[in-house]
Amino acid sequence: MMLKHTIRSFRRRITSNSIASKQVPREKLECVVIGAGIVGIAVARELALRGKEVLVLDSASTFGTSISSRNSQVIHAGIYYPPNSFKSLFCVKGRDLLYKYCSQHGIPHKQTGKLIVATSAYEIPKLYYLKDLAAQNGVHGLRMLEGFEAMKMEPRLQCVKALFSPVSGIVDAHSLMLSLLGEAENYKTTLSYNSTVTGGHLEGNHLHLHVIGRNHLENWDGKSVLHPELILIPELVINSAGLSALQLARKFDGLPSTMIPPAHFARGCYFTLSNTRIPPFQHLIYPIPEDGGLGVHVTLDLDGQVKFGPDVEWIHGIEDISSFLDRYDYTVSAHRVERFYPEIRKYYPNLKTGTLEIGYAGIRPKVSGPGQAPMDFVIQGEDIHGVPGLINLFGIESPGLTSSMAIAEYIASRFLK
C-alpha cells in the first residue's frame, strides 16, 4: 500500500506549481524501472510476476513513445550478432518467447520470413559469412538460394543470391506493450507518467533517485538549481531509459564515470510505398548490412503497407534535458528520398520515381560511433560498477524489441535477491 500512497502523493506534488526546496519527501520501495518502453515494460512485468512491487517512471505522457514505437517492428531471427553476445543470446531466446507470447495472448504478428540479398557477386561472401554466424548463434532453418530461386519467391526482386530466414517476422509492437503492461499492472506494478528521473545520489547502500514532474522540467531555465520534488529509495533500480539512459547515468553521483560508455545517436528515416493495393513483396527484404544499421530494407506491416528504411544519419549535440524530454528531431526531410531510390533499386529495379512518401523517423541509442565496430548490449550490475541495487541498460537498440522478454528474464534471474 505504501507504493500506491507514494504515487498518489507524488502525483499531487507534480501537479502543484511549487518545488520543494528544503524538506524533500522520501519514499522507500522495492523496484523502480526507469523507462516505459518495450524493454522497461517487459522487465517490470517479469519482476512483478516474481512477486515484487514495481514502480515504472517515464517522462512521457504514455508508454512506448520513443524507440519502441519508431522502428521496423521486426521479429529478428538472430543472424547478425557475434556468438555468445547478449544480442545473439537474447535475440534467439527472445524470438521464441515472443512468438509463444503473441500466440497465447492474441497479439497481432506474422512469421513472414526474410530474404537477405546479394545484388552483386562482390556481396556473396558476406551472405555465407552471415549464414555461418547464424549457425553459431543457433538459428536453424536458413537456406542459401540462387538468384532465380529467390526471384521465384519474389518476382519483383533482383539479386544474384539470397539467404532465406524462415523464422523472421513482424509484430504489432503497441499491442505487445499494451498486453505486457496489463499483466504487469495486475501484479503490483504502478506507472507514473510525466515523471522524470533527473539524477540520483548514493547514500549508505542505496541509490536515491531524484524525481521531478515533466512540467517543471519543461519550464526550467537550464541554469538554476533543479530541486527534486520526490526522492525514491528503491532496493532495485533498472535504468531502462533508452535514449537518455547514458545521460541519466552520468547524473548518478557515486557511479564511476569510467563505467559509462560514450553516447552516440543515429537517426533513421522511413518512406512508405504509395498507391499500392497489392504489396510488391510478401517477405521482408534486406540488403547486406551497412555501417550503423542493417541497410534500407523492405518492411511489411500487418495491414500490408510497405515501408523502406531506415537509413543512417549520425546526430550530435544532444543536451541532457532534450534527451530526458525526448526533444529529438524526428522530422523526415523530403530530400532524403533522393538517397532511398538508388539504394532500393539495387534489389527492386522497377521502383517508380514519385511512389515513395514520407513515413516517420526513429533514433537509435548506440555505444559505438561512425566507423566503429558494432557494440553489444551493455548490462551493468553492482559487480561491474559498484553501486548497490543499480542495473544500467545501455545501447539497447536493435534487436531490443525481439530481445525484450529474454532481457527481462535475465535481469530477474541474475539480480533479484
Image (cartoon, rainbow, N blue to C red):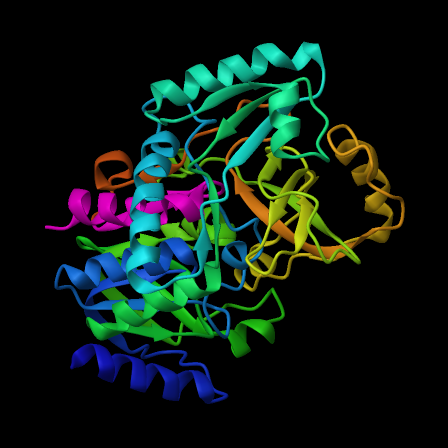
What is the number of callouts on the image? 0
Is residue 352 placed above or below 185 in the rendered structure? above
**Res. 14 image quadrant:** bottom left
Q: Tell me what residue is drawn at x 37 percent, y 19 percent.
A: 135
**Res. 371 image quadrant:** top right
| Residue 89 falls within the magenta-colored stretch | no
Magenta segment boundaries in residue numbering: 389-417
Residue 405 horizontal/vertical position (percent):
31, 49
| Residue 416 falls within the magenta-colored stretch | yes
Left or right: where does residue 92 sit relative to residue 66? left
Residue 254 visible at all: no
Is residue 354 placed above or below 134 in the rendered structure? below
Residue sitting farthest toward the left: 417
Residue sitting farthest toward the front: 152
Nearer to me, 332 or 222 = 332
Residue 167 horizontal/vertical position (percent):
42, 37
Nearer to me, 115 or 75 = 115
Viewport quadrant of the N terminus: bottom left
Residue 31 horizontal/vertical position (percent):
22, 62
Residue 408 visible at all: yes
Residue 6 horizontal/vertical position (percent):
26, 80
Q: Tell me what residue is drawn at x 38 percent, y 35 percent.
A: 259
Is residue 61 placed above or below 13 in the rendered structure? above
